[in-house]
Amino acid sequence: MYLPVLQVLRAVAALLVLLFHARLAMAQHPDLQSLRAVFQYGFVGVDIFFVLSGFVVGMSAQAMLQGLSLKNFAYRRMGRIYLGYWPIFACAVLVWHSGTGAVKLNYAQFWPSLLLLEPHLYSNWLIVAWSLTYELYFYALIGLAHYSGRPKTLIAFFCTGLLCLHLYWHQQMGGTYIHGTPWPFVLSPFCLSFFAGYAVLLCYQSHGANFSWCILGLGMLIFGAYLGMNCALCADVPLYRVGSFGLCGVGALILALGLQGLWKSAPAWLAAGAALGDSSYSLYLWHTVLLQIGAYLIGQCLPQARTTMLLFALLLPVLCVLWATVWFRYVEWPLYKKFLSYFATN
């Protein structure tokens, strides 16, 4: 089931994260300080990605009930993540070693960063990789749930227990996790966002989408944004973030599906948006590296060419999008297709 509107939503999520991190380059230019506040909530794009993954990967996991093995599911999901990540990781390492940008490499974190085993934001060499660690964990959870043959029951019990546990932690211990253990990752509230996307998939498959989905989705989107923007903890405490910005992600997904159901024929802009959505993974991985290079150039050249650097800072996000589109077309997607063809014949 291919839904172009989901690709558009994926593009929106990637652009939000891009603009959030573009504040790094803007910080180098005094004329762009006011724009930084506009993009401060762009990190919600990650929450949209988590919800979208629950929807899209849920469809892949359902195929296991129709003959696709758990091994096949795992290979495809891991191939999609790692084959897109490793080439960009290698390019990022070359950039950091060149002295361009402000990233200080901790060599003890090389293997966790390479293998996507590090869920902490600033411990990864490529900073956005923390979310990919969660993605892999989500894939494992939903794959095992479907392999059991009773995915709905297991997921419902898991989410209910997870929510109750976090509510207890926040009431009894002020939201403090047991540091030095894997539990903050294994029992992360972000799982709730992922499985919320899966729940939306089940509702969509059972009832379809109509105009009421647009109303519901828009309401959830606005309410979640209101909660997140009026609570300082929502950006940093995972449970609060899931209850606010995660709700935005669910609302955005429901709204997108509702709009898809209303259109008798796809609007002309949908194809362009879907094409950008195809390259969203490349954009998500590449943009921090490109922005670091851009910030370095702005910082070096600002005293000599202030107007030129102002234009460059404004165009930098556009350049990131163009580069990601080219990379997807000529590197990421051909590499993954080669992997699938090899996998299909072996």
Image (cartoon, rainbow, N blue to C red):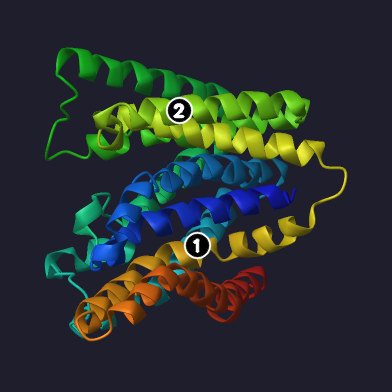
Residue 269: give its label: none
Amino acid at dot 2: Gly
> Secondary structure under badge 2?
helix
Point out residue 302 in the picture as x, y percentages from the top left corner: 23, 79
Query: Dot 1: few (<14), some (14–19), or many (≥20) neighbours within 10 Å?
Result: many
Q: Is residue 234 above or below residue 346?
A: above
Residue at 38% x, 76% y: name it.
312
62 and 84: which is toward the camera? 84
Point out residue 168 in the picture as x, y percentages from the top left corner: 25, 14
Examine the image and state in which quarter residue 315 appears. bottom left
Examine the image and state in which quarter residue 278 appears. bottom right
Which residue is under mark 2? 224
Q: How many marks?
A: 2
Amino acid at dot 1: Tyr
Residue 281: give its label: 1
Point out residue 230 in the picture as x, y percentages from the top left corner: 32, 27
Q: Is residue 149 visible?
A: no
Residue at 37% x, 51% y: name it.
131
Q: Name which of mark 2 and mark 1 comes first in the sequence.
A: 2
Residue at 47% x, 66% y: name it.
283
Q: Does residue 219 appear to the left or right of 126 in the view shown? A: right
Q: Does residue 101 appear to the left or right of 139 in the view shown? A: left
Q: Is residue 82 visible?
A: yes
* Alpha carbons under labels 2 and 1: distance apart: 25 Å
Residue at 51% x, 69% y: name it.
321
Point out residue 102 in the picture as x, y percentages from the top left corner: 17, 71
